[in-house]
Image (tube, grey):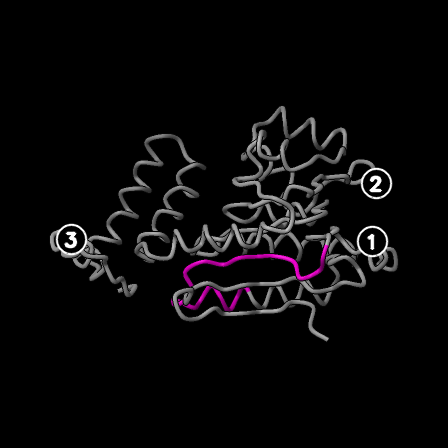
Amino acid sequence: MATLRIERLDGSDSGILLLGLERPEAKNALGRQLLQEITEALASAAEDLSIRVVILHSLVPGVFCAGADLKERADMTQEEATAFVKKLRGTFTALEYLPMPTIAVLEGAALGGGLELALACDLRVVGGQARLGLPETGLAIIPGAGGTQRLPRLIGRSRAKELIFTARKFGAAEALDYGIADRVTDPGKALESALDLAREILPNGPIALRAAKEAIDQGLDLDRLGGLNVEEACYAKVIPTEDRLEGLAAFKEKRRPMYRGR
C-alpha cells in the first residue's frame, strides 16, 4: 500500500502538486518505503515544467511526521543505519533543490526528521496546535538529515543550538517568533492557508520564480559580490523569455498576464 498520495490539482489551481504523507499506523514515520516514494516523487517533479508549486502535507490527523522510524531503525546494522540516514539526507537535499517553490504544511507533531523534512521546503505554514522539535540529542544522536545546517541558516546559530542542545519541543507561536514558521493558522486550517499562499504564487512567471529561488539559495552561500554575480546570471535567464514580453504587454494593456513558462 502506498504511503505517499500524489495529487495534481486542476482548474484554477492547475500547477499545484500535493504530496500527502499517509502512513497512519506509524504517524508518518520515515521508513524505507515512505522515503523511497518521496524520493521518486521529487525526481519526477523536478523534471515537470508544468508544476509551479509543491505542497507537502499530512493526510494523518494530528501529525505531520513523527521523524525516523525508530522501530525499523532498531533492526538495522550500523552500516544499514548509516546508509539509510545518507539516503534521507540526499532526499531532503533533493527537496531543497527542487526548482519551483515548495511549502510544508505542519499540523500536529513535526519532530526530528519530520521537522528536518519541513526545513528543506522554502516556506512553512503551521497549525496552531502543532508541536515541533529536534529531539535527537535526547536519543544520544544528532539531527542527521540537514537539521544542523538548515536550522541555523534559517534562525541563527545561537537559537538553533539552544533548540538542538535542549531537544525540547515548542509550539506554533514560538516557531513563528523564531522564523521557522512563515504563517500560523487556527488548528486544522494550515493546508487551506498553504493553498491560499500557493494561489498567490501561481499567477507569477514560472521561469522568474525558479530564477528567483536559484538566485536566493545560491547567492546566500557566497559573499555579497558573489551573490550579485549569481543574481546577474539568473536575471539573464528571464531576459529572452516570452513570459517577460507578456508581462510588459499586460502591464501596458492593463490586463492580467498569461504566463506559459516560455
Relative vertical location of residue 2 with respect to residue 147 in this rendering, above or below = below
Residue 15: image x %, image y %? 41, 65
Res 52 → quadrant: bottom left
Tell me the residue at 55%/33% (across/down). Answer: 179
Closer to the camera, 216 or 204? 204
Report whether 167 appears left or right of 45: right
Between the residue at mark 1 and the residue at mark 2, the CA separation in whole angstroms equals: 10 Å
Residue ID at (53%, 57%):
55
Residue type at mark 3 is Lys
| Residue linked to disc 1 | 70
Asked if the residue at tag 2 contacts the one at tag 1, i.e. Cβ–Cβ closer than 8 Å, the answer is yes
Mark 3 or 2: the one toward you? 3
43 part of magenta stretch: yes
Dot 1 surroundings within 10 Å: few (below 14), some, or many (20 or more)? some
Amino acid tagged 1: Leu
Label count reads 3
Q: Is residue 75 left or right of residue 176?
A: right
Disc number for residue 139: 2
Residue visible at 47% across and 68% down? Answer: 9
Under tag 3, what secondary structure?
Answer: loop
Q: Which quadrant of the structure image shows residue 216? A: top left
Residue 16, horizontal then vertical, whole percent:
46, 63
Image quarter for residue 169?
Answer: top right
Q: Earlier in the sequence, mark 3 or mark 2?
A: 2
The amino acid type found where label 2 is placed reads Leu
Residue 16 on the magenta span: no
Front position among marks 3 and 1: 3
Q: Which residue is mark 3?
A: 254
